[in-house]
Image (spheres, grey):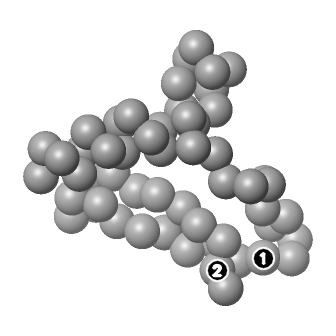
């Protein structure tokens, strides 16, 4: 559980020093008028990550 949280904390969440961007940002922002967004629950929903639906 700790490894999952540390991976999210270090790679996916926004960082103040990076102008509120994650270290591994997606290639481009999703156009919400054309794409649906899926939520991926981590640690039973304590953390949520969002991705463009295929």
Q: Which of marks 1 and 2 is nearer the N terminus?
A: 1
**Which residue in the structure is indicated by mark 2?**
53
Horizontal arrangement in the rendering, residue 13 relative to residue 46 (left or right): right
**Which residue in the structure is indicated by mark 1?**
35
Q: In this view, does 52 lie above or below 15?
A: below
Crowding at mark 1 (Cα within 10 Å: few <14, some 14-19, many 20+): few
Examine the image and state in which quarter residue 21 appears.
top right
Give the camera-side residue of 39 and 18: 18
User: Residue visible at 68% across and 20% down?
Assistant: 19
Q: In this view, does 14 lie above or below 12?
A: above
Between the residue at mark 1 and the residue at mark 2, the CA separation in whole angstroms equals 7 Å
Look at the numbered discs 1 and 2 and tell me whether their residues touch, using CB distance below 8 Å: yes
Crowding at mark 2 (Cα within 10 Å: few <14, some 14-19, many 20+): few
| Residue 27 percent location from the top left of the image | 74, 55
Examine the image and state in which quarter residue 54 appears.
bottom right
User: Residue visible at 23% across and 51% down?
Assistant: 4
| Residue 44 percent location from the top left of the image | 21, 64
| Residue 53 percent location from the top left of the image | 64, 80
Q: Residue lying farthest top? A: 17
Give the camera-side residue of 40 and 3: 3
Under circle 2, the secondary element is loop
Q: Residue lying farthest left? A: 1
User: Residue visible at 33% across and 51% down?
Assistant: 47
Examine the image and state in which quarter residue 22 appears.
top right
Under circle 1, the secondary element is loop
């Amino acid at each position: 559980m700790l490894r999952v949280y540390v991976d999210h904390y270090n790679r996916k969440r926004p960082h103040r020093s990076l102008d509120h961007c994650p270290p591994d940002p997606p290639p481009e922002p999703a156009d919400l008028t054309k794409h649906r967004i899926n939520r991926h629950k981590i640690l039973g929903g304590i953390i949520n990550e969002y991705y463009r639906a295929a």
